[in-house]
Image: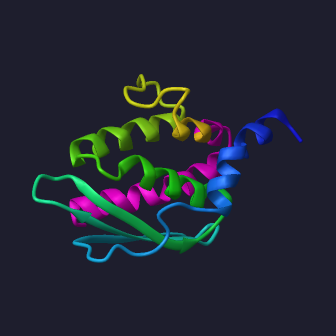
Amino acid sequence: MSDLLKELYQEIILDHGNTPRNYGECEPFNKSADGHNPLCGDKVHLTLLVDNNNIIKDIKFTGEGCAISIASTSLMTQNLKGKSLDYANSLFKDFSNLVTGGNDKLELITEEDSLYSLKGVGAFPMRVKCATLSWHAFKSAIDEK
């Protein structure tokens, strides 16, 4: 197995892929969105409860897909629960830069953060869509698109 593949399927990715956190539906919820990657079959349905102060009180998902897609969604929900929508938008930008190898400096994600485990995805362009699927669904939900 190549070093790139080892990096891609780190223990944290396998853990979250096999035992996703925040799986299910929020009860109640006031925002939701679906994401689908027809190239590999990944599907995600997000539900969120956002309060009047724009704080994500709860966020959960259902769906199916590869280990990267499920792990990314699980890690996303862990990192966004309890946070403001402003923070969430900044984290979305950072995560996009992390997995696409963007030249922008990361402002919120450090090497110690769980999300950093997905950095290796950038070496596999087809997998970037897997990693970002739920993040784009999240943006759709909060932007109400």
User: Residue 34: image x %, image y %?
Assistant: 40, 72
Q: Which residues are magenta?
A: 119-145
Q: Is residue 125 magenta?
A: yes
Q: Residue at x 37, y 44 (%)?
A: 92
Quadrant of the drawing holding the C terminus: bottom left
Q: Residue at x 31, y 71 (%)?
A: 32
Residue 92 in view:
yes
50 in the magenta segment = no
Placement of 67 over or under 40, stated as above or below: above
> According to the image, what is the colour scheme of the structure?
rainbow
**Residue 99 on image: x %, y %:** 54, 39
Which one is nearer the viewer's eye here, 62 or 98? 62
Provide residue 7's location: percent of width, then percent of height. 73, 37
Main SS class of the magenta portion in the image: helix
Judge from the rendering whether residue 137 lies leftward or rightward of residue 117; answer left or right. Answer: left
The N terminus - image quarter: top right
- Residue 125 lies left or right of residue 101; in this view the side is right
x, y (%) of residue 70?
58, 61
- Residue 53 to residue 100: above or below: below
For the point 29% across and 50% down, the residue is 82
Question: Residue furthest toward the left?
Answer: 52
Instruction: Give the vertical position of 139 relative to 44 (above or below).
Output: above
Numbered circles on residues, count: 0
Residue 67 lies left or right of residue 47; in this view the side is right
Return the residue nearer the eye: 51 or 100: 51
